[in-house]
Image: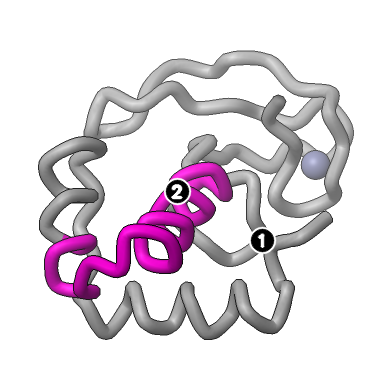
Amino acid sequence: MPWCKRCGAENFYKDGKNSHGKPLYKCRKCGFRFVWTSDLPRRNFFSNVIAFATELYATVGISLRKIAKYLKKSFDIKISHEGARQWLLASRKQHFIY
Ligand SMILES: [Zn+2]
């Protein structure tokens, strides 16, 4: 469920598309327009994708490079293996647990 990236309200409407064809939302409360790319603050990925990558790494033990490649292939998410490492470190600190 999208929420406003500025004020956190879940009160918004669809307001066209951005140049990449992604739907834009506009907050009814503060007027902020945003693309729903993540349910995490200051990230461009959904937490379930991060959880998936983290689990792959923890249970299958595949390399960060392979995870980065896999994310590109499966979700069209561009991330470096360095970026993936940042996720894993952050998730270990339980930043992603709600
Ligand atoms: Zn808002």
Please state which amino acid type lies under the numbered disc 2: Phe
Please state which amino acid type lies under the numbered disc 1: Pro
Relative to 1, is 68 on the left or the right? left
Q: Could you tell me if the residues under marks 2 and 1 are in contact, i.e. CB atoms within 8 Å? A: no
Who is closer to the viewer here, 64 or 21? 64
> What percent of the width, then of the height, locates residue 29?
88, 33
Relative to residue 89, is residue 51 depicted above or below? above
Magenta stretch encompasses residue 53: yes
Q: Residues within 10 Å of mark 1 (few under 14, many from 20)?
A: few
Residue at disc 2, CB closer than 8 Å to ligand 1: no
Who is closer to the viewer here, 6 or 75? 75
Span of residues in magenta: 46-68
Task: Give whichever of discs 2 and 1 has the lower sequence position.
Answer: 1
Q: Main secondary structure of the magenta part?
A: helix
- Quadrant including the C terminus: bottom right
For label 2, the residue is: 52
> What percent of the width, then of the height, locates residue 55?
47, 56
Residue at left offset 83%, top offset 28%? 10
Where residue 12 sits, quadrant-wise, is top right
For label 1, the residue is: 41
Query: Disc count in the image?
Result: 2
Who is closer to the viewer here, 37 or 13? 37
Ligand 1's quadrant: top right
Residue at left offset 23%, top offset 74%? 64
Relative to residue 22, is residue 53 depicted above or below? below
Q: Report the Cα–Cα distance between label 2 and label 1.
A: 18 Å
Disc 2 is placed on an element classified as helix
Residue at left offset 32%, top offset 78%? 83
